[in-house]
Image: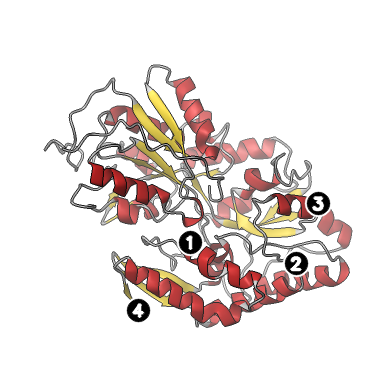
Amino acid sequence: MAGAMTIALALAGCGGGGSGESSADTYGFPQTTQDDKAEITVWVDADRSSAADAFKKANPGVPIKVVTYDGSANGSNSFRTKMQLFDRAGSGWPDVVFSTQNNDAAWASQKSNGKQAFAAVLSGGLVAKATLDGFTPGSLNPCTVDGKTYCLRNDLAQVVLWYNKELLGKFGYSVPTTWQEYQALGEKVAAEHPGYIVGTVGDAWTPEVFFWSSKCQANNITGPKSVTVNTDSAECKRAATMLDTLIKNGTTPNVSVFTPEFVKKYSGKVLAMPGPAWYAGAIFNNPQSLNVPKGQLGVAAPPAWQGEPAVTGNVGGGTWFISSHSKNLKAAEKFAEFVTTADDYQVNLAPGYPAYAAASTKWVQKQESSGYYATDLQPIVKAGTEIWDGWGSGIFSQEAIWAKTMTPAIAGGKSLVDLLPQWNTAIKNQAQVDGYTVK
């Protein structure tokens, strides 16, 4: 999940394979000498600690060391940076790594500093084909490079419209079905119920929520090292214009949902909020966040731009990688498969909508049977099929670019429409630094 709190990163410790690899390539990559009893080191963010705990409980005979780190949250790039350090040292690689980002396969599948790629090929027999086939169609696309799968998706992060059914009814408002209706709702709220909000723009994944859902061509990865960037399009401008209106009237504040300020100021004040599926457990049904009471939270399909079919963005979702350097690939695979497919974690504990199809069906049933939600959760399921394919998963992080370029400018009172050229330049520059040809 995106937005996890940063935890101190321990660099020491690893089940990795030393400076040299053997020529064995049973699964499509060179392997070091294997030891089925070797301890595996697993890196997780704070929110995935329960996944590691569930695995240890279900597999007490597997020696495992768990290290918490920030999960590359908000495009920090810590995963890649640390692996590059281990590549130079020739040792130290963890056996399994969780990342909140969907762009890591683009670099983890490639050689670095003369070393073999960090990510093990999973589709060459290391993970059973039946298991890979069990993931929701399209969910492994960010993990697939040149036809090979390099990671497993933890959960899907399609954007839906969360809303407080009780408050909307009390104020006499309808659930918006288009972005035009959504803007009109924000304008009514500002005039009639100041202090209440219909969204936020304070997080690094704001472009995935609003601009991706508007088919803004800011991140169209067209090849392994090519990208089309055009923030001057009508699709980009309409999203920016809408947000400028709602930022100015206070209904879409520039505050991160993961800050004490947000919880203090907006608990009980969120009328609606476009956001990923994982907002359910991370923000709304969370005693440490908004803690929306049972029977109030509803979910609707993502709004459409009038006259167009609805499409949605994708906000993270999380990926699990197995190291090609691991001395115990058998245990590493067992862990990665468990945390992405097993009911013990994905159905019983996971806060977000699982990427593994069988688990997602059970997750929805479990959530609905709890009686917590004011509506059924089918809009989440449907939105999973509406993610627009014009926004890709390149090496560079759109979240990091937005956080550095746009968030401070919004805080300074600048218009998003006026900032679009600056955003375009920032994306282009970062893409070129990472070796992309930019159109």
How many labels sit on residues? 4
Mark 3 / mark 4, whichever is N-terminal: 3
Gap in angstroms between the C-alphas marked 3 and 2: 14 Å
Q: Residue at x 32, y 46 (%)?
A: 83
What's the mark number on residue 97?
A: none
Question: Which is closer to the viewer, label 2 or label 1?
Answer: 1
Mark drawn on residue 251? 2
When the figure is inspected, residue 61 is found, relative to residue 211, above or below; the finding is above
First in sequence: mark 4 vs mark 1: 1
Badge 3 crowding class, 10 Å Cα cut-off, few under 14, some 14 to 19, many 20 or more, is: some
How packed mark 2 is, by other alpha carbons closer than 10 Å (few <14, some 14-19, many 20 or more), is many
> What residue is pinned by disc 1?
400
Q: Amino acid at mark 1?
A: Ala
The residue that label 4 is drawn on is: 439
Dot in front, 4 or 1: 1
User: For residue 268, which numbered disc appears in the image?
Assistant: 3
SS for tag 1? helix
Front one among 68 and 384: 68
User: CA–CA distance between discs 2 and 1?
Assistant: 24 Å
Q: Earlier in the sequence, mark 1 or mark 3?
A: 3
Viewer-closest of 106 and 356: 106
Q: Earlier in the sequence, mark 3 or mark 2?
A: 2
SS class, disc 2:
loop
Q: Are marks 2 and 1 in contact (CB under 8 Å)?
A: no
Asked if one can make out residue 108 in the rendered structure from this viewpoint, the answer is: yes
Q: On the image, which quarter does residue 371 sit in?
A: top right
Task: Give residue 227's position: percent from left, percent from top.
Answer: 35, 71
Q: Marks 1 and 3, how far apart in space?
A: 30 Å
Alpha carbon separation for disc pair 3 and 4: 45 Å
